[in-house]
Image (spheres, helix red, strand yellow):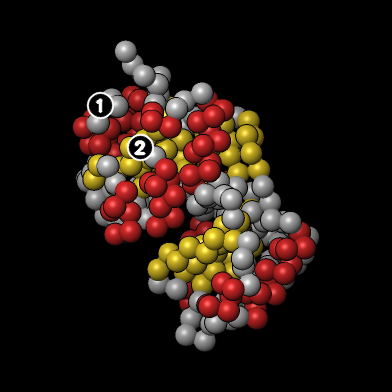
Amino acid sequence: MNVRKALFFDVDGTLISERNGQIPESAHRAIQAARQKGHLAFVNSGRVFSLLDPIRQAIAMDGYLCGCGTYIILGDKELYARKIPHERGIEIKAILAKHGMEGILEGKGGCHFRRETSPMPRLEQIRRNIQQAGGVSPYVLEEDNYDFDKFCCVSDASSDVAGFIRELPDFDVIDRGNDFWECVPKGHSKATAIHRVLEACGIPLENAYVFGDSTNDLSMFACAKHAVLMGRHDKELEPYATFVTKTVEEDGIAWAMEALGII
């Protein structure tokens, strides 16, 4: 009997190559073959919805779990949405400035950056990358006429990271390495998004397969019974992996799906 499975894919370093920004043709074929067999395939990303347009245009999926569980689309309908309360958003901007952090405020309508050029080159590189994807909001960080779902930030030697984290007891602050931090409202993660989707689809947790490579995949690796780790990955995920596949460029998704009998 073909038991319906739910497949959850991280984006950067898992679904797409961080070297060329492309989804391998083998991954396209494997995911569509799984869907044809009745399985469901989802993007589960730290990216907010506004940054997933290139993925949505490139490959058909059954839904999108965005912003580390803060926004979920199932089929063509909104299943869940949670914004940071407006006043708390204003406080966060002040906290970033107080501790010498540079923020990227992420929401459904795009990403908000400071008006002027940042003294931190890393932030400007991120801005350029997001501009190329069409994800920069016309509303800048200094304005207060918008809300956002989560945020990321960049630090340097002059930043007070410890002080910054202390002022965010309502957030999980994920160290993504290289002075880059991802800040997600507590109670939200890639794992909470998975549970919401499984409940809505009537699929048990034991039939869920997750595919990932980096530290913000940790929650879904810890919750899933089947955790597929890409060949190039962060070491923190290794204790939770049930299967280690090849890299994106080596057709790791297709290789794992075949080896695990999904297709």
Q: Which secondary structure, mark 1?
A: loop
Please state if 18 lies on the left or on the right of 162 as rendered: left
Q: Is residue 27 above or below residue 176?
A: above
Residue 235: percent from the left, percent from the top? 29, 59
Q: Is residue 110 above or below residue 141?
A: above
The residue wearing badge 2 is: 225
Residue 86: percent from the left, percent from the top? 76, 59
From the image, which quarter does the C terminus lie in?
A: top left
The residue wearing badge 1 is: 261
Q: Which secondary structure, mark 2?
A: loop
> In percent of the image, x 48 and y 81: which residue is there?
156
The three-letter code of the residue at mark 2 reads Lys
> In percent of the image, x 71 and y 63: which residue is there?
89
Say whether disc 2 or disc 1 marks the residue closer to the N-terminus: 2
From the image, which quarter does the N terminus lie in?
A: top left
Q: Spatial distance from mark 2 to mark 1, Cα to Cα?
A: 15 Å
